[in-house]
Image (cartoon, rainbow, N blue to C red):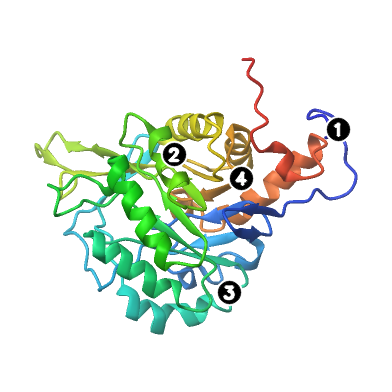
Amino acid sequence: MTAIGSQNQGNAPRLAIHCGGVDLKNPVLTASGTFGYGKEFEGLIALPALGGLVTKGISPKPRFGNPAPRICETASGMLNSIGLENVGVEGFATAKLPYLRTCGTRVLVNFFGTTFDEYVGCGEQLGKLDGIDGLEMNVSCPNIKAGGIEFGRDTRVLSDLVRACRSVISKPLWVKLTPNTSDIVALARACAESGADAVSVINTITGMAIDAHARRPRLATIFGGLSGPAIKPVALRMVYQIHRAGLGIPICGIGGIQTGIDAVEFLLAGASAVQVGTQNFIDPASAERVVREIEDYCRQHGVSDVSELVGSLSSEA
């Protein structure tokens, strides 16, 4: 391995990487819920330049989401309570997937349900569709049969859910973990032991915002998911904890990535790939720029293969 820090300006570094059963041309994807179904960004970004994209979450049937207001800005981030609005499996297959089959990059489809059976059924249906390279299961949804607790917060329930979905899905299966937990390693271990191919870390952090003048919450649902640069330190910590635990499951890092340096930090912490999320709202071409900036970093630091960065963080401050 070439020592990081040498100023080698020679051949172009190799950016291709394998993560969770999916071969990526580079480690940069776009995050679910921030990139629509891909076509919305056509003409704004060169999709073939990306390692991949993750669609917005798909449920068995269409959902219309939460009432407005459902987005508000916060210091160094944003809160959203969209309510997982989407076209459903059938609408996705007929209206969205044909474009994605020709978009020139890897396609992962995020999916979810409100019951155990909905998760399994939705995953099974999506897993049978051509043009999908992998599935990302969103387990941050409330289990309506268990008092509203998130599926992904109980290791036993999470294990059973991943195992059940794994049994009907042959495509690569990633699990997007909730950060609203006291033990992220235990959740990742449950996924690894139950057959998941990778974990995406992290989803949004539950928060709220208040309009002091109106004396009311800024979101109609009161609480929402916090994303953006504000959550990056939490995301880095959780990626590092999972990697350090030696579970053997690849990690896709998510949370406040704005630049190539941000992405490199996640790779150093142990992620094999990253997803750009909230930054897409600010700069629709940000993910493409992040790819270039990772390549620039590798050139500047004498890194011939981006995989050399994965988990190479020094333990010394």
Q: Marks 4 and 3, Cα distance to the nearest angstrom?
A: 23 Å
**Residue found at x 14% / y 33%:** 212
Q: Amino acid at mark 2?
A: Arg
> Residue 44: percent from the left, percent from the top?
55, 66
Of mark 1 and mark 2, the one earlier in the sequence is 1
Which disc is residue 272 wearing?
A: 4
Q: Marks 3 and 1, Cα distance to the nearest angstrom?
A: 36 Å
Q: Amino acid at mark 1?
A: Gln
| Vertical order, 23 against 132 (above or below) | above
Q: Marks 1 and 2, Cα distance to the nearest angstrom?
A: 38 Å
Of mark 2 and mark 4, the one earlier in the sequence is 2
| Vertical order, 159 against 180 (above or below) | below
Q: Which residue is mark 1?
A: 7
Q: Nearer the viewer, mark 2 or mark 3?
A: 2
Of mark 3 and mark 1, the one earlier in the sequence is 1
Of mark 4 and mark 3, the one earlier in the sequence is 3
Q: Which residue is mark 2?
A: 189
